[in-house]
Amino acid sequence: STGGLVITAEQGVVDIETEVAQLNVTNNTGTPAGNIVINEADDVLLVGNFFNAATNGTIALTTADGSIDTGTVAVSTQDGAITLTAGDTGSNNGSITVGTNGIASNGAGAGDIILNAADGVALGGNVNALADTVTINADTGDADNAGAISRTGGTVSGSSIDLDAATGIVAVT
């Protein structure tokens, strides 16, 4: 896919289906929380912003058949869970790349961070759930048993860290 999409909301972004190359999403406030739920057809690069400032507002981004790359965007919520799911329908392209500005669930309540990738997770920035759980699954949603967790930068932190990879967990230096 080509092109980009910019969404700025005050009450959440729910059940949006996209087929774009780049996403820039902000939810500023919201009562109730105002969640961000986006289903993307293929690969997506996050640009500009990808955050939910609404207290307890969540983020859920899913690709049906493609990678998710956070680029230089700081993906974050205010006391809400974050779930990124990169799917794969057979071409080994369902990976997640966490860029230099990382992923964080901020605030006193924080929220779980779940990264589900069919074909691997590359960590280049922090993943911080504060007092909640970080779960990184590098081989979910397909049957090819391909998917490693690799780390070139950043730290994974939370009250509990769960890592699952079919082909290894490595630090790349």
Image (cartoon, helix red, strand yellow):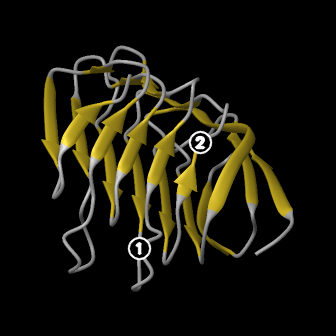
Q: Residue furthest front?
A: 173
Quarter of image, res 152? top left
Residue plotted at (61% across, 66% down): 43
Q: Position of residue 4 (x, y in %)?
A: 84, 60
Quarter of image, res 95? bottom left
Q: Which residue is mark 1?
A: 92
**Quadrant position of the N terminus in the picture:** bottom right
Image height check: is 73 above or below 87? above
Residue plotted at (15% across, 20% down): 159
Q: Could you tell me which secondary element the residue under label 2 belongs to? A: loop
Horizontal arrangement in the rendering, residue 110 relative to residue 5 (left or right):
left
Inspect the image, locate mark 2, and give the three-letter code of the amino acid beneath it.
Thr
Mark sitting earlier along the chain (1/2): 2
Circle 1/circle 2 CB separation < 8 Å: no
Q: Which residue is mark 2?
A: 70
Inspect the image, locate mark 1, and give the three-letter code of the amino acid beneath it.
Asn
Quarter of image, res 116? bottom left
Whole-angstrom CA distance, mark 1 to mark 2, is: 19 Å
